Image: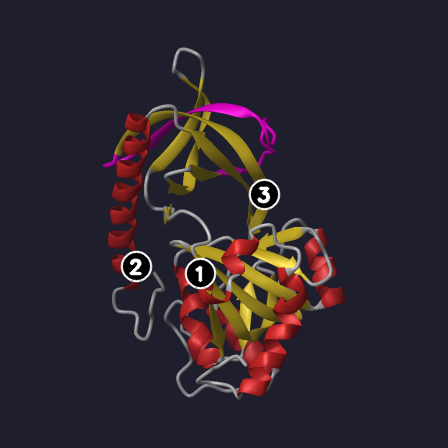
Amino acid sequence: MLQSDDLPPEEVDQLYRSYFADYEGNREEAEVYAENNIQILSGAKTIVPYLQTALLEEHLIEVDIAQLTRAFFTVVADNNEIIQTLLEQEKQTLINPPQDLGEYLKATNFLLTSPLSPNMGNVSIRHYTSAVFKYYTGTIAVELGCTFRNVYNDSSNPCLVFDFPQIGRVIKGFRSFRAKVLSAVNAKVSLLNDQGQAIGPFYQIEDISVSGLGFLIPDNEPSFVVGDQLHLGVKVEGCGDLSLNGMVRRIVPLRRFNSFNYICGVQFDLETMAMATDVERLVAAIQRLHLRELAEKTAGLSGIRIIR
């Protein structure tokens, strides 16, 4: 029987089975689902830090809707005007309305996200209502069972409203450490020709690991497809430059309120040990930049704990 400090064991068992029992059967990475690799999260108090981490670190959330094989994507949202409107609609009041980024997650019983991408997910979630949210931080995967509540229909800033998740799990050793690159860091990647010269635009790097990187493609659909081989130039201010070869492994559309992007994931082809070492040094330097920026971003915020 699953244990929890926040909920009765019987309730934890029931919640876990309702979100994760059939979900595991479709996994290719079965070895990481061994019992000793999984930590159960139950109750709002336990789950709040993981949602605050997803919000503050701007993590892309994969949304697996019950009974569908296609994955959709979103980001956790925070908007004081929307929060207050929702509280008024539900005839709830807060003595001290949350003002700090992510504070509403401790003070309310709902979770806000941007609309799902691709768009069909916004139709499917209305029908099925049950979904699993998943994101990566460090070498772990965080999965949270969520139930759709309704849509906040503001034409300038639409969002989805979910009940606050009561069950989740942390899966250890899911993949190699991936350093998150916050948007304020000048970290760019470009395509290179055979002479090593940049061709086309520079793209903002989303995250990077010793095995690959993800970057944002704004507005227009990318000219390359999954399986294409790319020659990349990576430039990170204060950390150094690298030229690398890699294969496109994923291209994901994502709408973040008023903007629309694609996220492209590339797996590196590291030909020498020296090249692998250079990538490791770059990842470490980017992580140091990230930690400094995150410390500044969260300075003065009360009750915020980032999961590392």
Judged from the image, the secondary structure of the residue bearing numbered disc 3 is strand
Q: Residue at x 45, y 15 (%)?
A: 193
Q: Earlier in the sequence, mark 1 or mark 2?
A: 1
Q: Earlier in the sequence, mark 1 or mark 3?
A: 1
Q: Amino acid at mark 1?
A: Ala
Is residue 112 visible to the viewer in this orientation of the structure?
A: yes
Is residue 151 visible to the viewer in this orientation of the structure?
A: no
State how far apart marks 2 and 3 are (Cα): 27 Å
Q: Is residue 9 left or right of residue 279?
A: right
Query: Observer-nearest residue: 166 or 30?
Result: 30
Query: Observer-nearest residue: 14 or 50?
Result: 14
Find residue 207 and report its horizontal and vertical position in percent.
41, 44
Q: Which mark is residue 54?
A: 1
Q: State whether residue 56 is above or below residue 191.
A: below
Residue furthest to the right in view is 127
Residue 131, image quadrant: bottom right
Judged from the image, the secondary structure of the residue bearing numbered disc 2 is helix
State how far apart marks 1 and 3 are (Cα): 18 Å
Q: Amino acid at mark 3?
A: Val
Determine which residue is flagged by label 2.
Answer: 297
Determine which residue is flagged by label 3.
Answer: 252
Region in magenta: 216-239
- Asked whether 245 falls inside the magenta stretch, the response is no
Query: Observer-nearest residue: 218 or 67?
Result: 67
Q: Earlier in the sequence, mark 2 or mark 3?
A: 3
